[in-house]
Image (spheres, helix red, strand yellow):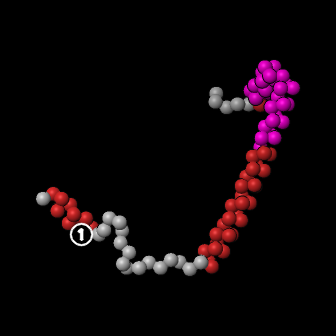
Amino acid sequence: MGEFSIWHWLIVLLIVIMIFGTKKLKNMGSDLGEAVRGFKQGMKETDAPAEKTAETDAAATASTPPPQVTASAKSPLGTRAEQAEDIAFKAK
């Protein structure tokens, strides 16, 4: 029990053929093949632009120097000390 022999699979195949018929199974098989083919083609098409984009990004990054960060740049909220001071002032 729990194991399927070749006879089990043949009986299942016979029942499926009787329910759907050979023409319907043939159409389903060809539709499935076309779907797989379309999926593979779509994957190739999406991979090609991604590779081109990666190459252009790498070239652009290599030619552009990184931006300079200055010490005088502050966040819009200020430092933690300034935030704590503002909270203490508002609490009074």
Judge whether residue 22 is colored magenta.
Answer: yes
Q: In the image, residue 27 lies at what x, y percent?
A: 84, 31
Q: Residue 16's quadrant in the figure?
A: top right
Please report the residue visible at 77 percent of the width from the left and 41 percent of the height from the top.
Answer: 35
Quarter of the image with the C terminus is bottom left
Q: How many marks?
A: 1
Which of the two residues, 30 or 58, is positioned nearer the viewer here? Answer: 58
Judge whether 44 appears above or below 52 on screen.
above
Label 1 CA crowd tier, 10 Å (few <14, some 14–19, many 20+): few
Judge whether 43 appears above or below 34 on screen.
below
Residue 65 placement, left or right of 19: left
Which of the two residues, 41 or 74, is positioned nearer the viewer here? Answer: 74
Label 1: state its secondary structure: helix
Q: Is residue 14 visible?
A: no
Please report the residue visible at 35 percent of the width from the left and 72 percent of the height from the top.
Answer: 74
Q: Specify the amino acid type for callout 1.
A: Ala
Judge whether 49 appears above or below 43 on screen.
below
- Give the labeled residue for mark 1: 81
Q: Residue 32's quadrant in the figure?
A: top right
Q: Is residue 72 visible?
A: yes
Q: In the image, residue 37 lies at what x, y percent?
A: 80, 45
Judge whether residue 23 is colored magenta.
Answer: yes
Q: Main secondary structure of the magenta part?
A: helix
The range drawn in magenta is 8-36
Q: In the image, residue 65 lies at what x, y percent?
A: 56, 80
Which of the two residues, 50 or 12, is positioned nearer the viewer here? Answer: 50
Please report the residue visible at 32 percent of the width from the left and 64 percent of the height from the top.
Answer: 77
Q: In the image, residue 83 lies at what x, y percent?
A: 25, 65
Quarter of the image with the N terminus is top right
Residue that lies at the very extreme toward the top in this rendered image? 18
Residue that lies at the very extreme toward the left in this rendered image? 92
Residue 56 placement, left or right of 75: right
